[in-house]
Amino acid sequence: MNAHQPVTIVMIEDDEGHARLIEKNIRRAGISNDIKHFMDGTSALAHLYEAPDGPALNGPALILLDLNLPDMSGTDILQKIKADGNPLRRTPVIVLTTTDDKVEIQRCYDLGANVYITKPVDYESFATAIRQLGLFLAVIQVPDIELEA
Amino acid sequence: MARGWTIPLLRSERSVSRFLMACMALGFIALIGSAGTAGWFVMRAQEHATWVEHTYEVERRISTLRVLIERLEVARRGYLLSHRQQTKQTFLATVQDELPLVADLRRLTADNAAQQHNLDRFQALAIEHFQVLSRSMVLADKAPELATAIFTHDQSLGITRDLRAVTAAMLEEENKLLEGRIEAQRDAVRILFYALAFAGALAVATAIFSMMVLRRYTRSLVESRDEVLQLADELEDRVDERTRDLSRANEEIQRFAYIVSHDLRSPLVNVMGFTGELEAATKPLAALVDKVEAEAPQLLDQDAALAAREDLPESIGFIRTSTQKMDRLINAILRLSREGRRVLTPERIDLAPLADAIVASLQHRLDEIGAEITVQRVMPPVVADRLAVEQMISNLVENAVKYLKPGVPGRIAISAVNERGRVDIAIADNGRGIDPRDHDRIFDLFRRSGTQDQPGEGIGLAHVRALAYRLGGFVDCKSALGEGATFTLSLPVQPTIQG
């Protein structure tokens, strides 16, 4: 994915089953990048900004974001990441959620989401969608994080 | 007219009108009373005038009588002195005049005993007077030289004096009568005055009183009108508040349905996903069983073979169809709740082109099954949300097409009538009909009727009914098994519910 440094995939998803299915299908698409899974917004934000191996301090990342989280709304996280002057603002965010509400989709793009994908209930479609996302991840160029200093 | 006792009169409109009627009646009584009094007075005055005239008549005759007596006296004296025949004739004529006058007086004073008595006396004196005078005149004819002596000595002077006294008494009597009559007339005038004054006062009092009552009544009317207006305002506020509460509750339910259906989808993704994983895992297992059976049949357990080949695929199949159905149901709830959240925009809708468009969208299927839809050419317009009306009619027409009787060419008619501020849109078919027992049930969510040979979740009619309610209308079904069905969608011509 990136020539000089491996891109970490940060998956923020409160449903373990979903996370497992997503991971399985990404792997099936031949993506071997490290996937870090967080079940709630707080720990995910802590990792993004503070962990020594987190994206803010170390290396490029790609974020898979679910909107329905137990402690905060996914759009809050999106808003934080995409805010002006944030070191992570150029990090691609792929919203992957069950909500297919038009208003919600518009809101996410307005906030700076790069891709919005609705999880199909039908498993074949779901698997296909994730595998295609994997193919997409294989060719996507992720910018390096600009460290503030 | 203290406030204390006029207020109870004002309690009700009826008591006020009763009171005013009483006032008016009192006023009329006063008027009739004064008119009666005036009439009585006029009659009294007329009677009085007659009597006064009568008195004057009597008095005039008495005066004439007095003049005649004097003239008799004068005529005799003249005759005694001159012996002229002419004077004698005058004397006789005067006596002649006296008789009818006395007769008249007798007639006029027939009701008065005192005057009759006076007249009796007068008549006696007059006869005596005549006899004395005529005797003296006869004597003078015989002995003219005695005339002076006769004149000096006979009693005629005394009789004349008596006659004067009697007639004076008669005049006195008449004057007394006249005075009494004038007094009576004065009394009548006084009575008239009092009666009129009383009636006038009564009328004025009634007028003032009823005016005050009317004013107070009007004031209380104005007050109660203000009160009613205020109440109406309050009521409007309360209705607004209730409407706000209701729409808030409605929103809450919609949001609830929305959130629930979303949250239900999330686990469903897992069920479906891992079922897929299971299915995928079954394949290598089945392959392994096949391989074992081929290469080392003694290792193969009958149960394991059955599980891998039949039990697992069967269970997975059931899980799959159930979850698929569940997914469809959740999607239906989601769609209904989304429809409930949509903002309605009422606009004038021409129903015929709208129905035509629906028919056109179904044309392919109609050609396939040989059915026909007729659209009434002139339909009354309706003001409502276009999308909602389109969805309702479309759902009903699709249902009609879906449940036609096999082997009978389908005939469906779309029509509409305006009835008392509502537009009734009817979709009638000659299809398989609906058992009357199910007429209420079919409008419930996920409920269906008759043979389940058509795809569907039992959502369409529930959706139609929810939309109809939102537009302030309702939907109704008339049908019998095998007789076709008519669904009537009744909408207000103008929207009654906003939002």
Image (cartoon, coloured by chain):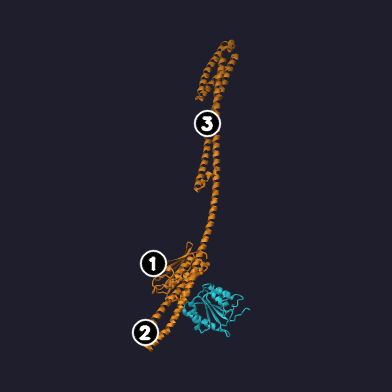
Chain colours: A cyan, B orange
- Separation of marks 2 and 1 at Cα, in angstroms: 54 Å
Crowding near pointer 1: few (<14 within 10 Å), some, many (20+)?
A: few
In this view of the protein, which residue sits in the foreground, B254 or B422? B254
Mark 3 sits on what residue? B47
- For the residues beneath circles 1 and 3, the answer to whether they share a chain is yes
Dot 3 falls on a residue whose secondary structure is: helix
Kindly identify which chain the residue marked by label 1 belongs to.
B
- Separation of marks 3 and 2 at Cα, in angstroms: 151 Å
Identify the image quadrant of residue B90: top right
Answer with mark 2 or mark 1, whichever residue precedes in sequence. 2
Quick one: which residue is furthest to the front in this view? A52
Q: Position of residue B327 (x, y in %)?
A: 45, 74
Dot 2 falls on a residue whose secondary structure is: loop
Tally of numbered tags: 3
Disc on res. B301 = 2
**Amino acid of disc 1:** Arg
Answer with mark 3 or mark 2, whichever residue precedes in sequence. 3
Res. B273 visible in picture: yes
Mark 1 sits on what residue? B437
In this view of the protein, which residue sits in the foreground, A86 or B7? A86
Dot 1 falls on a residue whose secondary structure is: helix
